[in-house]
Image (spheres, rainbow, N blue to C red):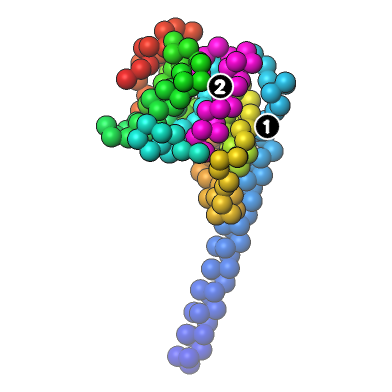
Amino acid sequence: MKKQKIIKLLKNVFLALVLLCAVGILVLSVCNLTVIWSSEGEINLEETPKCDAILILGAKVTGDTPSAILRDRLDKGCELYFAGVADRIIMSGDHGRVNYDEVNAMKAYAVSKGVPEEHIFTDHAGFDTYDSVYRAKKIFLCEKIVVVTQQFHINRAVFLASSVGLEAYGVTCSEEGYRPTRFTTNVREPLARVKAVANAVFKPKPTYLGESIPIYGEASASWD
């Protein structure tokens, strides 16, 4: 009798685990399809409308040197600027520590490519994609933006930007200096899309907000 109870218990545990796995797979699939289907995704440079700003999403820097993935984004952002897509750029990244500063490294790189300093806004609290697009809307008062990032990331970035009320377009940069790993494309990004849907539904506040710095005003007000 005791053995039968144990077997029954194990069977119930097994069925519960199977059900949880099925629910998890369903949630993962629905969230990923929602992000991919409901975002504008990639558009060609020639199709990009005039926007309030070009939003370049931050990535790793070493000292003052942008990583390969970030250089690809910056090069495309500068290309869009000189093509007249927007006359303002927002460099949004992590500057949460004194000894780690993505945004000023991004700004310096763009200036070295010929972008006027006074046309570059810096967002020091763009700790993730959601924070970056939320702050583009609420702090910099943008209405229409172009988001620059890699192909694997573009749908999520545009989806999140649209979820906070931005008219958002995505332009992918080259991946000459950076190739996403299978883990990034097959594991990390699908899971990040689940979080993106949760953010779109619940709309949490970003890590930091603060006073507005209108994109049509003085860029120097955003510098640190």
Q: Determine the secondary structure under disc 2.
A: helix
Measure the C-alpha gap from mark 2 to mark 1. 17 Å
Residue located at (52% from left, 24% from top): 55
Query: Which amino acid is tagged 1?
Result: Glu
Q: Position of residue 186 (x, y in %)?
A: 60, 53
Q: Which residues are magenta?
A: 69-91
127 or 70: nearer the viewer: 70
Figure label count: 2
Q: Which mark is residue 78?
A: 2
For disc 1, the neighbor class at 10 Å (few under 14, some 14 to 19, many from 20) is some
Query: In the figure, 180 relative to 97: above or below?
Result: below
Residue for badge 1: 42
Q: Nearer the viewer, mark 2 or mark 1?
A: 2
Residue located at (44% from left, 10% from top): 118
Residue located at (52% from left, 85% from top): 7
Query: Which amino acid is tagged 2?
Result: Cys
Q: Which mark is residue 104?
A: none
Q: Is residue 190 visible?
A: no
Q: Position of residue 191 (x, y in %)?
A: 54, 49
Q: Position of residue 95 (x, y in %)?
A: 35, 31
Q: Is residue 79 magenta?
A: yes
